[in-house]
Image: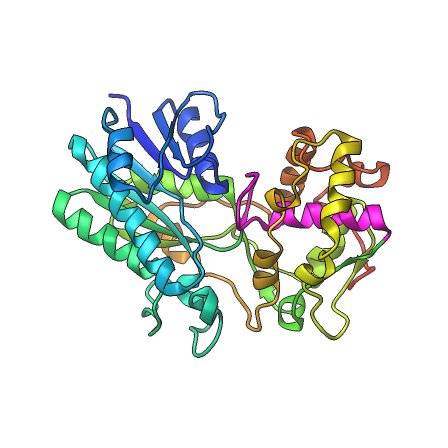
Amino acid sequence: MTETALVVGVTGIAGAAVATRLVERGWAVTGVSRRSECGIAGVRSVRADLEDAAALSAALADTKPTHVFLTAWSRQPTEAENIDVNAGIVRNVLAAATAGGAVRHVALMTGLKHYLGPFEAYAAGVTPDTPFHEDEARLDVPNFYYAQEDELFAAAERHGFTWSVHRAHTVIGHAVGNAMNMGMTLAVYAAVCRETGRDFRFPGSEVQWNGVTDMTDAGLLADQMVWAATDENGRDEAFNIANGDVFRWRWMWPRLAKLLGVTPAGFDGKPAPLEEQMADAAGVWRRIAERHGLREADLTRVASWWHTDSDLGRPIECLTDMSKSRKAGFTGYTSTLDSFARLFETLRAERIIPPATPESSTVESSTAESNAAE
């Protein structure tokens, strides 16, 4: 029997990766997004407002998924609003998806704010020791990830499906218009630096520059979500998901600079947030886009300064433990530097960022060496 998947947030970094993996495995896939079709071959696109329960149910009336992959969220001004809107999205999706009576598993993507707290209290107060483990108690603060989980657990109890939760760190992947996209943001930042003759300056904190961290490749996240949806060891569990390697930004930064053809500059005693560095970048980016025939000249569609600033500006070390899913049978791994290199190649091929300079095009990601910012 052909498995039938509903991928919610299919135009996002994670959703697109999940849909691609499922199509490769021969699944019948329906992808839901609010504004546009996903453009992934083999995916049936449905446009619907996830906050409108009636409209969503109508849009999915002829869809009877066996598996649901939830990768969408909507950023709101306050955490109270985040909870109201994003818990509502999970509730609306599951009400519509289970109407057909076929759902067997629901996979929900969340993230490390489960351990760090919401944006308005991000990394403030008492947080667990690193690396983060899945059995940590919830923080004593309102958090929309907790509200999403509670909606998932309640629906699973009512309808009898199994579930999995996937707590990703910063995700490396490709999606234009995504609100949380460090890889693309850094590539755009580098292009603006090259255009204006600026150094590629590390924007974050001393702790992030010197401390150990990890990240999550979108393809690896997709692999874990599909594994959990199809393997009995992945059922009714929450899992961290990161690439499996760890690094320090003082090591990674000059290597990214070389891949992107810019001159690196490390932490110089105080953070240099991208929202400040790039305050005048909209016109520069439009000029770059027009000269190179890029697909998106609107800077806000390709860079999310605030999100990269929040990740690189953290005052604490941040990395996860992957033992739980490894013991359960998921052993996926990828190099974070290679993840960045693949992303940059994809962005160039799809005319999202300008072509590589002659110097950067010859860099081998596994052997790139630079001491300029170390």
Is 356 inside the magenta-drawn segment?
no
Residue 344 visible here: yes
> Is 62 situated left or right of 200 in this image?
left
Which of the image's four quarters has the C terminus? bottom right
Magenta-highlighted residues? 171-197
Any magenta on residue 184? yes
Q: Please determine whether, in this image, residue 188 is positioned above or below residue 275.
A: above
Q: Which residue is drawn at 24% across and 36% down?
A: 97
Measured as percent of width and height from the top left, residue 201 is found at 76, 60
- Comparing 28 with 64, the one in front is 64
At x 43% / y 78%, what residue is drawn?
A: 126
Give whichever of 201, 340 is nearer the camera: 201
x and y percentages locating residue 129 in the rendered image: 45, 73
Seen as rendered, the residue at the extreme bottom is 125
**Can residue 65 be seen from the camera position used here?**
no
For this view, does 357 lie left or right of residue 47? right
Q: Which residue is drawn at 39% across and 64% down?
A: 79
Across and down, in percent, residue 360 comes to: 80, 41
Left or right: 189, with 211 as reference point: right
Q: In which quarter of the image is the N terminus?
A: top left
Is 257 above or below relative to 268? Answer: above
